[in-house]
Amino acid sequence: MRDSTLSRRRFMQRTSAGLVGVAAASGGAAAIDDPKPAPQSKTPTASHSPVLGAQNTDVGALLKSYHIWDVHTHLNRFAGTTAEEKVDDCLRWADRMGVERMLVLTVASGGRDPDAEGMRLMNDECVKAVKKAPDRLFGCAFMNPNYGQACIDEINRCVRDGPLVGLKFEFDTVRLASSPEMDPIIARIGELHGVVMQHTFIETIGNFLGETTPVELAELARRHPSVTIFCGHTGGTWELGIRAMKGVPNLYSDLSGSDPMSGYTEMAVRELGPEHVLYGSDIEGRSFASQISKVLGADIPESARRLILGGNMRRLMEPVMKARGMKI
Amino acid sequence: MIDTNVNLFQWPFRRVAGDDPASLVANLRKKGVTQAWACSYESLLYRDTAGVNARLAAACRQHGPNFLVPFGSINPRLPGWQEDVERCVEVHKMPGIRLHPNYHGYPLDDPAVGELLGLAASKNLVVQIAISMEDVRVQFPLMLVRPVDPGPLVDLLKRTPTLCVEILNSGYHGGVRTEHLDDIAKLENVYFDFTCHENVGGLAKLIAQTSPQRVVFGSHYPFFYFESSFLKIWEAGLPADQEKAVREGNARTLFGR
């Protein structure tokens, strides 16, 4: 019988001999472009992909050069018992991954179908988090459209009179984004120039009751064309989600919260234009790493990469930041 | 850097960059990979496993000699699978095989699995077991393939202590995390890639859950962006010796056992 163990060792010896040559042939460190905002072009041209691999000696510097803003974060499961402690832990990781700013969607869970009191408790935690790091975090107020007046009250309390800048709609409130109960809530946040993040998914195995798809969110966005709406996860099944989002100018693809499947970002850029695609992580359930890879690993122009990783968010957050007197 | 989890040829449901062997090799070399353990996407659905493995071996020889390491596919549900193992060893000189129990439709407590692992042990083959390939929530609706339960491996692998096994793509799958990893990790002959381990700093958590000596680099390229696993190493902020072990050393140990 053949000695396969020996064969395996021989193979390793042969390949390790070629290691040095390969490393030398793989080129130098990735070019780091200057960090000025990328031009907003519907037809990206110049393509200079960063080569992210073993030859990079300072991945941190490369990441920081992108001035990353993250459109989709949850602090619930970071270390700590208070919102402030969770912020500290989260920022430690964000610093390592070069993430400058994050839109915080939740800090604590309100369970399924939280009522007015439940929303208040959740939003209090988000307010605490944003106050802990106002230069690093934006915050969204959690909305349960089953309690319409309570939502309006929370918008006034947390956005008009508080530090939050937008709204978060989840899948566990059993109300589709296309339902008419959403309209007064979206209209109110529009008056305050705030943004909206809606979880969406198209699950092959069947959506949860009331779990919104990008098709339904597009209906809502068309009814409120002046409100900036983020399509959370781009429907998960992104080949369908991207198709559903086309032709809705105020609807933006959030790349977060799915496996880093090759081709995702390329299709989003091709079909929606780079100005309509946003990097998001969906931490702490996901990692910064897997989600940033969707942008750094994609075969797209460098200008598009910079828009997706931060340029678009800076542009889209500007109205609410101006309205709130926040430093841009 | 040794990438223990790549596949050649085309993913059945989508064209992706790097799905021809020449560009896959070029891309991986550009990213600093020095060796890649490759199976074939054809193995998921094709029934002529012998043909699949022959094409895999030929492509590895043609496009990546001393770079691509072919891991043949074995489906123990097919008649005559034992001959496929023989060809992997004797004809193609493959050092290992890869199993896709979920795509091939058998649980790991199927009696044929025990027989297969015993045969692999007798031939000193490394056995890679793919828990999953794709989040079930986003799969093609006419073909749902859920992750396989690795639980039976706890007892099964105790019976083959000399067999070297790598668990591929365990971790997070559509809201469900792979169970039984704590028990499987107690077996010294089992290694893990971290392709699908999520959470911030997920790699460091996997190492804590298993062993610093038995976590190896895998990218699931080209179906996944290669940069995902690469950045997970950076994100984890491992001590230098652990990082080196994950990138290369542990895979060499696994291969040389």
Image (cartoon, helix red, strand yellow):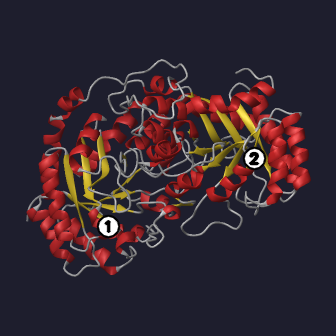
Q: Secondary structure at mark 1?
A: helix
* Residue B40 visible in the snapshot: yes
Q: Is residue A273 left or right of residue A323?
A: left
How packed mark 2 is, by other alpha carbons closer than 10 Å (few <14, some 14-19, many 20 or more), is: some
The quarter of the rendered structure image containing the N terminus of chain A is: bottom left
x 44%, y 37%: residue: B231
Query: What is the quadrant of residue A94 in the picture?
Result: top right
Which three-letter amino acid code belongs to the residue tagged 2?
Answer: His
Q: Chain of mark 2?
A: A
- Asked whether residue A213 is in view, the answer is no
Asked whether, in this view, residue B229 is left or right of residue A308, the answer is left
> In front here: B30 or A228?
A228
Percent x, y of residue A85:
72, 35
Which residue is rendered at x = 85% and y = 53% of the image?
A118
Locate the C terminus of chain A and report the quarter of the image it occupies: top right
Left or right of A120 on screen, residue A132? left
Residue A7: x %, y % from top left: 12, 53
Q: Amino acid at mark 1?
A: Leu
Q: Nearer the viewer, residue A75 or A144?
A: A144
Splitting the image into 4 quarters, where does residue A23 fall? top left
Estimate the x, y position of residue A151 in percent, counting from the top left.
86, 49
Residue A38 vs B77, above or below: the answer is above
State which chain disc 1 sits on.
B
Residue corresponding to mark 1: B44
Mark 1 to mark 2 CA distance (whole Å): 45 Å
Q: Nearer the viewer, mark 1 or mark 2?
A: 2
Q: Is residue A51 above or below residue B51?
A: above
Residue designated by label 2: A224
- Kind of element beneath mark 2: loop
